[in-house]
Image (cartoon, helix red, strand yellow):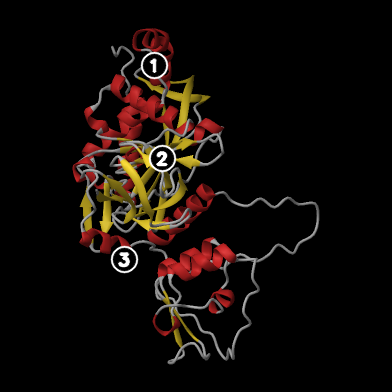
Amino acid sequence: MSLVDLIMPKLGESIMEATILKWHKQPGDKVSMDETLLDIATDKVDSEVPSTAEGIIEALLYKENDVVPIGTVIAKIKTTSAAAVNPTSTPTPKKEIEEAKVVEEIPYQPVTTNVSNTGSGNGVRFYSPLVLNIAQSEGISMAELENIPGSGQDGRVSKKDILAYVSNRGKTPVPAPVNVQQVSVINTSAPRTESPVAYQGGGNVEIIEMDRMRKLIAKHMVDSKHTSPHVTSFCECDVTNLVLWRDRIKKEFEKREGEKITFTPLFIEAIVKSLKKYPMLSSSVDGDRIIIKKDLNIGMATALPSGNLIVPVIKNADQLNLVGLTKQVNGLANAARNNKLKPDDTSGGTFTLTNVGTFGSIMGTPIINQPQVAIMAVGAIKKRPMVIETPQGDTIGIRHMMYISLSYDHRIIDGAMGSTFLNAVSKELENFDLNRVV
């Protein structure tokens, strides 16, 4: 008999931790190879984790709702042979785990408070970014945070301490503050959002608690604004040729390929062609360095039935023809709506497209999907009378018009480059070949 370690798997290049949602097995239960052992959630997608061995559960090292770094041992399985271990589930290297711990939570730098109490010899209490973010997401104010007993050095509050407090919150009274003389918060980084306070207004209202995904989306949006100085440029685009071409071929296309062709793959095709001309738009910022991504992985914002949003990614979109793009777009959209996305489906994006026109908006100012540096929004296509220039003179005709907008990171993309790229996408769409054969 031997013990096999079950490792929290690597779920994508930007994912450093996952939350355990549910254990399907308990100590003493039998488990088969590849049988679902637990459900986990990241900031992008929920997923199932299969067993990497066949045997009996010896121990579960974390509880449900625990946040666990990637590469951590989360369970032990007693098996008759160590050879039963799935070779693809190797632990993440120690260095990578340590780096993951460093960047578990980015938005706030460590905060110290000057507090005179009996629990700290030097009167200074340190809070890590992870503890502060847990406090923020759970609505714990700084005053309340000060009263949580800490088990770390000098009374420091650890992740274990604050999670234990959250699990018992409301069941036990909050300790009264002890000789608090002065509290001064030092924040050397991004501005900190005030902790929510209890609603005290009157009137006929309904209070709805944010679900887990909405909290994560809210956090990412605020983080993006804190990280990148946003600039948005707009362009008006005549997509008459594209609309007429799609109307003409869509029935034949669906009959032949078994897929409906929407405007999304056509937009992505134009974006990819323009990114090849202006590769800076497919990059990220690492300190004082610019990382240009050669693989063009296009994220497409997709609305879920719950009203939340998720961004599946089409990998190597520049290597796909229009049929391939259509199949990828439809497949990922269906998987998103049916909660069937895999963790890898939402990782590695280098540029994002969002279609605000789906909901009737004619234009939008999207927020950058970090760590990318640009995101493009397309609005609703509307028929409008437009001036048409011809060799015989100007005339007025009914045209299919659409606004497109580009939000970009002004740290590395200036207005000239952002507008030039947007104009390049517009020209690709406007000059669409009506006689194109698919």
Q: Which residue is mark 1?
A: 259
Nearer to us in this view, 429 or 17: 17
In x, y percent, where is residue 380?
51, 30
Q: Earlier in the sequence, mark 1 or mark 2?
A: 1
In x, y percent, where is residue 22?
47, 46
Q: Secondary structure at mark 1?
A: loop
Q: How many marks?
A: 3
Marks 2, 3: nearer the viewer: 3
Residue at image point 42% right, 61% down: 226
In x, y percent, where is residue 54?
30, 39
In x, y percent, where is residue 135?
52, 67
Q: CA distance from mark 2 to mark 3?
A: 25 Å
Please say whether residue 191 is visible from this viewpoint. Answer: no
* Image quadrant occupied by the C terminus: top left
Residue at image point 46% right, 88% down: 120
Marks 1, 3: nearer the viewer: 3
Q: Which residue is mark 2?
A: 311
Q: Which residue is mark 3?
A: 102
Vertical placement of residue 277 versus 214, above or below: above
Q: Which mark is residue 405?
A: none
Q: Residues within 10 Å of mark 3 (few under 14, many from 20)?
A: few
Q: Which residue type does callout 2 highlight?
A: Val
Vertical placement of residue 91 versus 363, above or below: below
Q: Residues within 10 Å of mark 2 (few under 14, many from 20)?
A: many
Contact? badges 1 and 2 (CB < 8 Å) = no
